[in-house]
Image (cartoon, grey):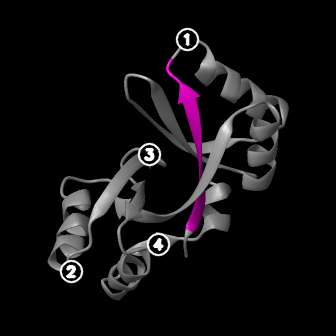
């Protein structure tokens, strides 16, 4: 139940993010979720898109360095304490969250959390055992 995420390394300068989104738009690839982190010299754009292979190909063809990472998508009630509940379960089981980002599907309903764990397979097992809905890649790409 892992989801493939692509990471794009960007020089920290004006227009680079716009260039990535233009390339993806022209290739008819839809961005489902994203996160951008930066340092003084470069940024890491993490993307979940509708066609990973095509996205990697067109970005590499345009000179971008692209990596692939497996992450886990989890659905949580969009309410106070929803994230705390998941993090509490993970903490009790000594699973570390390396990074995460989130988006809301529909206000007041559910949020989707994208996690990168230090022990991904263990995290999936623990979350499943605690009745936390894990969203498979095919479902996430089509949200």
Horizontally, residue 66 falls left or right of residue 100, namely right
Look at 47% across and 66% down and name the residue there. 72
Local SS, label 3 = strand
Q: Is residue 5 magenta?
A: yes
Label 1 to label 4: alpha-carbon separation: 36 Å
Image position, residue 136 (x, y; %): 58, 71
Look at 17% across and 69% down and name the residue there. 88
Q: Which residues are magenta?
A: 3-12
Towards the viewer: 130 or 6? 6
Residue of label 2: 93
Image position, residue 66 (x, y; %): 65, 44
Q: Along the polypeptide, which appears first: circle 3 or circle 4?
A: 3
Local SS, label 2 = loop
Q: Along the polypeptide, which appears first: circle 1 or circle 4?
A: 1
Label 3 to label 1: alpha-carbon separation: 25 Å
Image position, residue 101 (x, y; %): 39, 47
Label 1 to label 2: alpha-carbon separation: 42 Å
Q: How many other residues sit within 10 Å of disc 1, few (<14), some (14-19) or many (≥20)?
A: few
Residue of label 3: 103
- In front of the other: label 1 or label 2? 1
Q: How many other residues sit within 10 Å of disc 2, few (<14), some (14-19) or many (≥20)?
A: few
């Amino acid at each position: 139940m892992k989801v493939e995420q692509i990471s794009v390394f960007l020089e920290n300068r004006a227009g680079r993010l716009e260039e990535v989104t233009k390339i993806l738009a022209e290739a008819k690839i839809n961005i489902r979720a994203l996160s951008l982190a930066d340092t003084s010299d470069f940024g890491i754009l993490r993307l979940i898109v509708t066609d990973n292979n095509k996205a990697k190909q067109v970005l590499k063809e345009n000179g971008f360095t692209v990596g692939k990472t497996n992450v886990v998508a989890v659905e949580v009630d969009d309410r106070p304490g929803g994230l705390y509940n998941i993090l509490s379960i993970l903490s009790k089981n000594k699973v570390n969250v390396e990074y995460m980002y989130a988006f809301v599907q529909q206000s007041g309903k559910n949020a989707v959390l994208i996690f990168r764990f230090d022990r991904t397979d263990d995290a999936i097992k623990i979350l499943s055992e605690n009745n936390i809905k894990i969203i498979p890649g095919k479902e996430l790409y089509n949200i």
